Image (cartoon, rainbow, N blue to C red):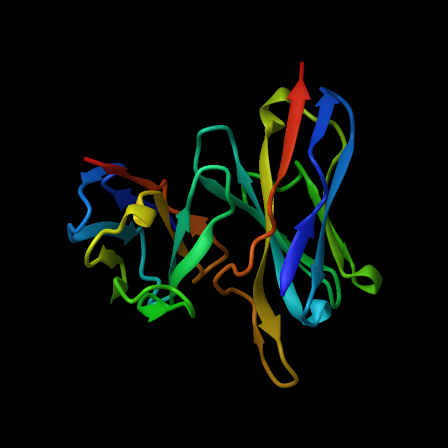
């Protein structure tokens, strides 16, 4: 089971960006994928989650309207995108597997395991 | 929103010490709590889930306890590999992380 994220990005303020997280070794469709931000020298902040099976998405209150989370189950990939980056978006972004759905039940919220290796996004002003 | 408060923010200890990190939730989260370890330049790794269940492959010197609003992570005998930053996380309603505890060598 692993999540592999896209590589580091260097962008200018105002540009758009979409980073990815590809899962393998498990049924990608049946597990929620979470995104987590870590600003330089700071702690972990939950951004949102997506269920690849039907693309249902929930956002953390600080990130609603600021980013878009999506998934393409045909290629086992989740995405995090920005329409207009700001210098304050400079951070490492992690994806992680979380809850799951089985035939008769769903667990939406669960521990994060495994995590992707992280994608460093640097935005210059 | 559920807030998570960890203490202390920094902890200095020596190899062999027993250490405890505390996490408090702003409202009851039952046992829906996980603990993570993060080393510099690496992704976090889960140690404990459901407040007291040890993740597979994690050394038994790590243990978690608590329910409701008060939780603790205990390392029974610190090893050199344990110096890192630790985070608690609630998953009762959406997700919230504590602000982290940096465990330093004394």
Give x and y (percent) for residue A62.
54, 39
Tell me what residue is drawn at x 23 percent, y 40 percent.
B8
Q: Is residue A58 above or below residue A90?
A: below
Residue A62 or A3: which is nearer the viewer?
A: A3
Q: Is residue B17 above or below residue B30?
A: above
Of the 4 image quadrants, the one containing the C terminus of chain B is top left
Tell me what residue is drawn at x 29 percent, y 46 percent.
B80
Give x and y (percent) for residue B21.
24, 50
Q: Is residue B13 above or below residue A101?
A: above
Q: Is residue A64 left or right of residue A76?
A: left
Residue A32 or A25: which is nearer the viewer?
A: A25
- Residue B6, visible in the rendered structure: yes
Q: Residue furthest right?
A: A74
Give x and y (percent) for residue A88.
58, 24
Tell me what residue is drawn at x 71 percent, y 19 percent.
A13
Image quadrant in which you'd find residue A114: bottom right
């Amino acid at each position: 089971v692993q999540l592999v994220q896209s590589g580091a990005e260097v962008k200018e303020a105002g540009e758009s960006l979409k980073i990815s997280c590809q899962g393998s070794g498990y049924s990608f469709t049946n597990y929620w994928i979470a995104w987590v931000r870590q600003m330089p020298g700071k702690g972990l902040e939950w951004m949102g989650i997506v269920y690849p099976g039907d693309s249902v998405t929930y956002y953390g209150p600080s990130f609603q309207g600021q980013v878009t989370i999506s998934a393409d189950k045909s290629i086992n990939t989740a995405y995090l995108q920005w329409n207009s980056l700001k210098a304050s978006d400079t951070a490492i972004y992690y994806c992680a597997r979380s809850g799951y759905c089985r035939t008769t039940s769903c667990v939406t919220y669960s521990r994060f395991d495994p995590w992707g290796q992280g994608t460093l996004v640097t935005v210059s002003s | 929103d559920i807030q998570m408060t960890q203490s202390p923010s920094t902890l200095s200890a020596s190899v062999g010490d027993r250490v405890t990190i505390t996490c408090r939730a702003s409202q009851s989260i039952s046992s829906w709590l996980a603990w993570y370890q993060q080393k510099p330049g690496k992704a976090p790794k889960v140690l404990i889930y459901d407040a007291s269940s040890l993740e597979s492959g994690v050394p038994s010197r790590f243990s978690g306890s608590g329910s409701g609003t008060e939780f603790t992570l205990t390392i029974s005998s610190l090893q050199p590999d344990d110096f890192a930053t630790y985070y608690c996380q609630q998953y009762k309603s959406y997700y919230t992380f504590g602000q982290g505890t940096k465990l330093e060598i004394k």
